[in-house]
Image (cartoon, rainbow, N blue to C red):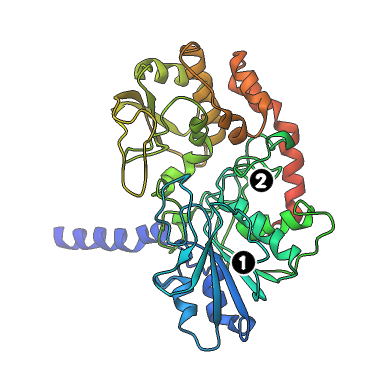
Amino acid sequence: MKNYFALFTFLLLAYSFPIFAQKANIQTGADLLIKENLNLLKNKNIGIITNHTAVLNNGIHLVDSLHHIKDINIIALFGPEHGIRGTEPAGKQVDNSIDEATGIPSYSLYGKNKKPTAEMLKDINLLIFDIQDVGARFYTYISTLFYCIQAAAENNIPIIILDRPNPIGGIYVEGPIRKDDVNSFVGIAPIPIAHGMTIGELAKMFAGEKWIGKDLRLDLKIIQLNNWRKKNYFDDYNLPWVSPSPNISDLQTALVYPGTCLVEGINVSEGRGTNAPFLTIGAPYISSDKLISEINKLNLKGVNLSSIKFTPEDIKGKASNPKYKGIECNGISIQIKDRKKFDAVKFGISLVYAINKLYPNDLKFRDGFDLLVGDKKIKEMILKGENPDAITRYWSNELSKFKNLRKKYLLYN
């Protein structure tokens, strides 16, 4: 009888649990290009804007796959921050080069030029864009997208966007709308910090709202994702995680990034130079217990904090000369416990608010804070001691307008 009961229990678990654990299949724009749309590429001189994230479901890079197909002629590659193969640290200028894997000339869009020049585009009559975004306005890949579709329109070159999922989903939309006086490469368009859109949807919005230029006409084609739902997260699907940049090594980091990236704009370590960047926050002048206590007073949902000591160091390919290099910092380790309740942007604002409240004489803002947050008034409100609820209310009306605006550009349910 015991053996029958054990067998029954095993079968019950084996057949019921996978229902909840099973990952959905998804096809990216890149996979669908290879599978169904190669005719679009025949007899064209092609330029591809891409990086290491442009991986097909079979694990092969898009460029490597296309390079071996007859009658596909790729004459140039264009790489964003971190380079074509994603090996350069954040903020490091990337030089023009020859792609070692294919021998194709590779132009940097994160060096002297951030937009393809007419000379770079000479002889190209089709552009393809395939880069995995993380869903945050200050992630520079969407600025590269902006400049590339602008250059395509200016030079009368059709462009195909190979869509990929927003890893943190398409429901969470939060943060101040970027103001014109803080337009920059970490805030290229008047959208909130967490935009809840895919690369394809953003391209439609940039062009449709005439942000790339009022008189420009863009020949845009988007190869949409198959079977992506906006309510889902990256790990709900069968796609392998390819770190979009060296310091976003998993989905947990991507989920917190729209908030803790704001720490880059103050004299507090955002965890670069540790094994958990953006999930590790601190500085020598901070008391972990005091900071945790102050943040906990705000009753933020979906997150647990624990105290941590860490010493940032150079990490090859990830961090070069990070803040407080070689100096012990006290701070917090962040664990997201309920991603659907966690508000990353409010958490980031709350974190800076709490540090300012505890250490007004130690905290220093950098010029980059205004560029990251997208609105100079946010820093003013923090310095005045206004609480995070008041700060988030400040941008709520403009955020509601954006949510209505974006509806006409959404491609997925």
Residue that badge 1 annotates: 120
Task: Judge left or right: residue 251 versus residue 160.
Answer: left
**Relative to 376, residue 294 above or below:** above
> In the rendering, at what x and y percent does residue 214 appear?
83, 54
**Which quadrant is home to the C terminus?**
bottom right
> In the rendering, at what x and y percent does residue 290 appear?
39, 15
SS state under label 1: loop
**Which quadrant is home to the N terminus?**
bottom left
> In the rendering, at what x and y percent does residue 261 appear?
50, 36
Mark 2, other Cα within 10 Å: few <14 / some 14–19 / many ≥20: many
Mark 1, other Cα within 10 Å: few <14 / some 14–19 / many ≥20: some
> In the rendering, at what x and y percent does residue 382 appear?
59, 19
**Direction right: furthest residue:** 215
**Direction top: furthest residue:** 361
Q: 267 and 257: which one is in front?
A: 267
Residue at 28% x, 63% y is: 11
Q: Earlier in the sequence, mark 2 or mark 1?
A: 1
Q: 176 and 247: which one is in front?
A: 247
Can the viewer see residue 258 in this picture?
yes
Mark 1: amino acid: Met
**Direction left: furthest residue:** 2
SS state under label 2: loop
Name the mark on residue 188: 2
Q: Nearer the viewer, mark 2 or mark 1?
A: 1
**Relative to 69, residue 56 above or below:** above
Q: 222 and 413: which one is in front?
A: 222
Q: Quadrant of residue 372?
A: top right
Residue at 71% x, 37% y is: 399
Residue at 50% x, 26% y is: 266
